[in-house]
């Protein structure tokens, strides 16, 4: 059975049980983008919807579609693959002005309709292969139309998002019944941004929505994107200038700091976990770049003499040659802390036998270059170790 067939079957069972309970969610007073109320923005992220055609992807019981029609004057179409979920919406809200419900696959449905003025999906797009769904949604929206996606970021078990575009098992929880297994694309924000960009969207913001109870593990992503204009078949070029071409390579450093509590990782505002590091500045040595980046991002003070360069990692990202020098920092002063105006913060120590999911690809590559035995999966890169004292760089007991 395919991944999407598994999901369709799970939502059919879910809808059937909700029909048996005769349960219809109340029409909300405002849009809620997560599984809890009062967190994050409302429908304003979609803009003024008065009179506009809006697509609700995976409309479920239809209560969000009714809210937008009644409170914001939108003309909403809810598309739902599960026949039982569609029956719940259609049987409850069939007579609501400005709302209609269609049953079918969203990609197939959009291939035969006029483009919509806006679209949103609350938790549902993660159940469809993004390589199939996103190009269909793009073609089903007019240029400039907003697309708002609410997606799982961290699940009930505290597992963070994946750094590869692949589904994994998640459970739909049911009252008084066993949970239903599904397959979901729970992806890091950077991956969603890359996919949306690839398929013709501009990502305007990605926010992480946390449960009101700070002890709860679940975190939701809210992605605000916009469909880019169509490009003409032929584009005229500008005259060539005398300025040098834009650099097509990036050189950076990544620093491994090891203590008795593990290695130091921070959370990027896009959600990935990363080593301290960044771009090498003009005229700067690799050691000096490591010291500067560690200080700027974590507040820790190190010296160039305490930096041991491991080697170079080379890979390509979006057509740009990326060269990263991994380094081991063996001494420092202070305690790591989030620094003002830095994109990475929430620094914490992680033991090597319990490394978290959601590592930034470059950080994952540096860690396996340092310790090839670490159980980390990542995109391949070419690693060339530096020589130290006439022998190749190697991890010693003092480095652990």
Image (cartoon, grey):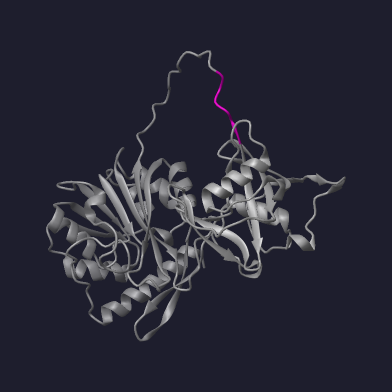
Spot occupied by residue 113 in the image (x, y as percentages of width and height): 29, 46
Spot occupied by residue 357 in the image (x, y as percentages of width and height): 55, 63
Spot occupied by residue 32 in the image (x, y as percentages of width and height): 26, 62
Taking the spot 22% from the left edge, 65% from the top edge, the residue there is: 63
Q: Residue furthest front?
A: 333
Whether residue 147 is in magenta: the answer is no
Whether residue 249 is in magenta: the answer is yes
Residue toward you, 302 or 356:
302
Res. 77 in view? yes
Res. 307 in view? no
Give the magenta part as a residue range: 244-250
Assign the C terminus to one quadrant of the image: bottom right
Spot occupied by residue 251 in the image (x, y as percentages of width and height): 62, 37
Q: Main secondary structure of the magenta part?
A: loop
Residue toward you, 132 or 34:
34
Q: Residue furthest bottom?
A: 176
Residue 267 relative to residue 354: left or right:
left
């Amino acid at each position: 059975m395919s991944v999407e067939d598994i999901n369709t079957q799970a939502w059919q069972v879910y809808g059937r049980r909700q029909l048996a309970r005769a349960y219809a969610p109340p029409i909300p007073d405002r849009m809620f983008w997560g599984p809890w109320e009062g967190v994050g923005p409302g429908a304003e992220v979609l803009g003024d919807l008065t009179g506009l055609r809006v697509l609700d992807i995976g409309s479920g019981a239809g209560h969000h579609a009714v809210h937008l029609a009644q409170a914001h004057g939108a003309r909403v179409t809810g598309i739902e693959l599960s026949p039982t979920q569609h029956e719940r919406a259609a049987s409850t809200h069939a007579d609501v002005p400005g709302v209609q419900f269609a049953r079918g696959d969203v990609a197939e449905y959009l291939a035969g309709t006029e483009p919509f003025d806006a679209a949103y999906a609350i938790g549902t797009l993660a159940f469809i292969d993004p390589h199939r769904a996103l190009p269909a949604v793009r073609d089903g929206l007019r240029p400039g139309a907003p697309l708002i996606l609410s997606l799982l970021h961290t699940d009930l078990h505290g597992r963070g998002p994946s750094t590869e575009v692949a589904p994994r098992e998640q459970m739909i929880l049911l009252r008084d019944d066993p949970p239903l297994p599904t397959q979901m694309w729970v992806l890091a924000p950077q991956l969603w941004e890359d996919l949306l960009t690839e398929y013709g969207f501009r990502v305007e913001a990605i926010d992480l929505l946390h449960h009101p109870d700070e002890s709860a593990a679940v975190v939701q992503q809210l992605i605000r994107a916009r469909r880019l204009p169509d490009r003409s078949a032929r584009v005229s070029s500008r005259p060539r200038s005398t300025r040098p071409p834009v650099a097509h390579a990036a050189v950076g450093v990544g620093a491994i700091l090891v203590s008795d509590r593990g290695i130091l990782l921070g959370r990027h505002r896009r959600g990935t976990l990363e080593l301290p590091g960044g771009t090498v500045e003009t005229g700067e040595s690799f050691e000096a770049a490591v010291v500067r980046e560690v200080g700027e991002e974590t507040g820790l003070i190190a010296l160039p003499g305490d930096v041991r360069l491991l080697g170079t990692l080379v890979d390509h990202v979006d057509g740009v040659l990326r060269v990263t020098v991994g380094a081991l920092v063996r001494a420092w002063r202070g305690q790591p802390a989030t620094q003002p105006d830095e994109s990475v913060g929430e620094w914490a120590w992680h033991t090597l036998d319990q490394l978290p999911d959601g590592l930034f690809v470059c950080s994952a590559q540096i860690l396996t270059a340092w310790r090839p035995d670490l159980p980390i999966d990542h995109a391949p890169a070419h690693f060339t170790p530096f020589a130290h004292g006439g022998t190749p760089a190697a991890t010693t007991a003092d480095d652990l």
